[in-house]
Image (spheres, grey):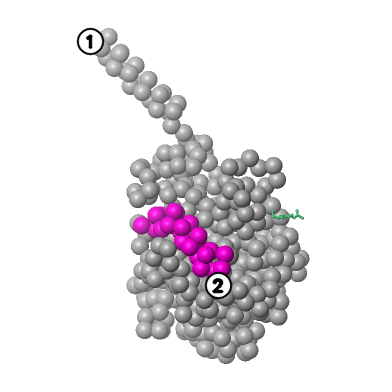
Amino acid sequence: MGFQRNSFMITVALSFIFRFATACSNGQCRLLDECSSDGDCASGLYCFSCPEGFSGTRCVRSIITDQFKLLNNSLPFNKYAFLTTHNAYAIDNEPSHTGVPRFTFTNQEDSVTQQLNNGVRALMLDTYDFRGDVWLCHSFGGQCHDYTAFEPAIDTLKEIESFLSANPSEIVTLILEDYVQAPKGLTTVFTNARLMKYWFPLENMPKSGQDWPLVSDIVAKNQRLIVFTSIKSKEQSEGIAYQWNYMVENQYGDGGMHAGSCPNRAESSPLDDKSKSLVFVNYFESIPVKQPTCEHNSGDLINMLRTCYGAAGNRWSNFVAVDYYKRSEGGGAFQAVDTLNGKLLCGCDDIHACVAGSTSAACTS
Ligand SMILES: *[C@@H]1O[C@H](CO)[C@@H](O)[C@H](O)[C@H]1NC(C)=O
């Protein structure tokens, strides 16, 4: 009896020791290792479940590779790729600012500050006239409503201002789906958010396919906020760039997710129009659903970027816009951007292969 109980205890003890000796923990788990909490994963990773991609919970990426820090920033702006969040403001758990419970969908899970800190460098924002101000909102019937409004634009713009002031070498691009009709409505809210001091001037944007200014020059001049609007007349009235004068863009939503085809969205010229120096690729569902997003943001996304490369006349995209940007099967949208920067900067499949003396096998050129 006594012996049996002792041997049982020893077996239990050994199995615990064995378990902890083999499983990782305490910040030592690497990409796709099993984990039970974020703290198990090495830095730059978090503990996530994607039943479409793997069993259990595993460490997946949560942060971009900063191409300017890994290499340098001496090339034109259009030679780099940037992670972009679709409807960056439509965030889970954003409290109601109207007093009415929100009844609409979300596209992201992190605050804008967290998105920027994790390496998002372009934000898609929907701007509306609402309650005598500019708000970020989903629309219903073309209008912002109490139950679809997320927050006053100035709140988000102030987060962007804080990030730009704390990170003096980083550039943020805003893509506005703009419904603001109030005269100088956008100019007023950007001014009030103290963002005009970072404004990248319209006259420095190439209009017929030339290279953009060097990132190092943009940083030196502190013109680190690049803003595009979807309203053409605002170039004239407010000096805000009309998006499709400067970039080509594929179809957004479900229409942009058919494998093997990369059509332009209606407002954009065909993707192979090289009089536009920037290429923008959307890859997200018309109605966001969290569960399958980890799969969309992984291999499917990279395949679409290759398809769009061909459609754009052999140009890799500069912006990749996704929903729930941290959901993936491992590398996700972060790896997709690393691949784009590798292609753009040294013709390799991963930016890490561009580092002098790299032994990375990811270079096929
Ligand atoms: C910066 O990086 C690019 C891309 O890897 C490289 O071609 C260029 O020579 C580098 N420039 C400097 C000044 O190091």
Above or below 139: residue 29: above
Mark 1 or mark 2, whichever is nearer to me: 2
Q: Nearer the viewer, residue 194 or 32?
A: 32
Residue at image position (58%, 89%) is 233
29 lies left or right of 74: left
Cα distance in 3D space between marks 1 and 2: 80 Å
Give coordinates of residue 7: x percent, y percent.
30, 13
Residue at image position (70%, 65%) is 76
Q: Quadrant of the N terminus?
A: top left
**Region of the chain picked out in magenta, as a range:** 292-314
Q: Of the residues shown, which amino acid type is indicated by label 1? A: Met
Residue 196 in view, yes or no: no
| Structural crowding at the residue carrying mark 2, measured as other residues with C-alpha within 10 Å and reported as few (<14), some (14–19) or many (≥20) | some
Give coordinates of residue 324: x percent, y percent.
44, 60
Q: Of the residues shown, which amino acid type is indicated by label 2? A: Asp
73 lies left or right of 66: right
Give coordinates of residue 312: x percent, y percent.
54, 69
| Structural crowding at the residue carrying mark 1, measured as other residues with C-alpha within 10 Å and reported as few (<14), some (14–19) or many (≥20) | few
Mark 1 close to ligand 1, CB under 8 Å = no
